[in-house]
Image (tube, rainbow, N blue to C red):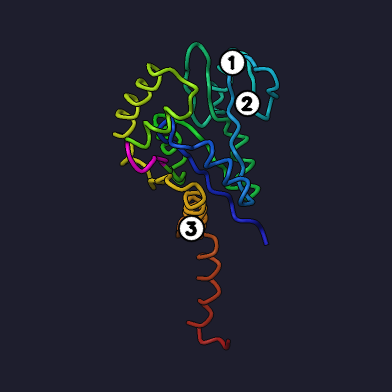
Amino acid sequence: MMADKGILVVVSGFSGAGKGTLMKRLLEKYDNYALSVSATTRAPRPGEEHGREYFFHTKQEFEELILQDALIEYAQYVDNYYGTPKAYVEKQLNAGKDVILEIEIQGALKVKEKMPETLLLFVTPPSAQELKRRLINRGTESLEVIESRLARAAEEAEGMPKYDYILINDEIEECVDTMHSIIQSQHDTVKNRESFIEKMTEEVAVFKKGEEV
């Protein structure tokens, strides 16, 4: 029996919501997930490998990918391009893998526009105070940077209604299990069961003709 096509899942959320930890734990705990690898024009950092952390390209190569419509979405940040290669994602989906893609709201909506069957998940802590506490406790950024992230969160919150599900990341294991359940439930939507519906409809049609069971 041929494997079902995978589900494309876009995960967004506030900085400090725990998206990275959540996805890392999801991949550790459950099989059948693939993390999408983005393309970029920025230089590799020490220890990074082409095809693992990113697909590294020159600016000319990246712009060629844009012209070829080879990216699901792309954006430019601080003189560098970042984008999601279509071929890589489709290969994983056709192999039956559920593909997780972590991008910000603008990119997420572009993906949904291009691939309407995409599942959009937004990760948030249970409260604004908890978000602030997590950012401070990371201890990796100045107060000024933290304040700018919180100000950005106020803007990002306006995009939450455009998502399919809101994941409240209070207790990590519970949130991972909820995320997994939501994704797996998508395999049984009518849209994703069209081939089965067609097959079943043909098979039961014989009963209407009075043929024996």
The magenta stretch spans which residues? 122-128
- The residue at the point 56 percent across, 24 percent down is 68
Q: Which quadrant is home to the C terminus?
A: bottom right
136, 173: nearer the viewer: 136
User: Does the magenta portion include 127?
Assistant: yes
Residue 86 position, x and y percent, is 57, 33
Compute the Cα span from label 3 to label 1.
Answer: 37 Å
Secondary structure found at label 2: strand
Give coordinates of residue 188: x percent, y percent.
49, 60
Viewer-closest of 33 and 188? 33
Q: Residue placed at 60% from the left, 55% from the top?
A: 4
Q: Earlier in the sequence, mark 3 or mark 1?
A: 1
Q: Residue at x 45, y 60 (%)?
A: 190
- CA gap between label 2 and label 3 equals 30 Å
Question: What amino acid type should be assigned to the residue bearing mark 3?
Answer: Ser
Residue 73: percent from the left, percent from the top? 49, 29
Residue highlighted by disc 2: 54
- Which mark, by number, is residue 42? 1
Q: Amino acid at mark 2?
A: Tyr
Quick check: is 99 in the magenta stretch?
no
Q: Identify whether 192 is placed above or below 137.
A: below
Mark 3, secondary structure of its residue: helix
Q: Which quarter of the figure is the N terminus placed in?
A: bottom right
Identify which amino acid the numbered label 1 is placed on.
Arg
Look at the numbered discs 1 and 2 and tell me whether their residues touch, using CB distance below 8 Å.
yes
Residue 190: assigned label: none
Q: Using the image as rendered, state which of residue 49 and residue 108 is in the foreground.
A: 49
Whether pointer 3 and pointer 1 mark residues with C-beta atoms closer than 8 Å, the reply is no
Q: Pointer 1: residues within 10 angstroms few (<14), some, or many (20+)?
A: some
Residue designated by label 3: 185
Residue at 53% over, 70% down: 200
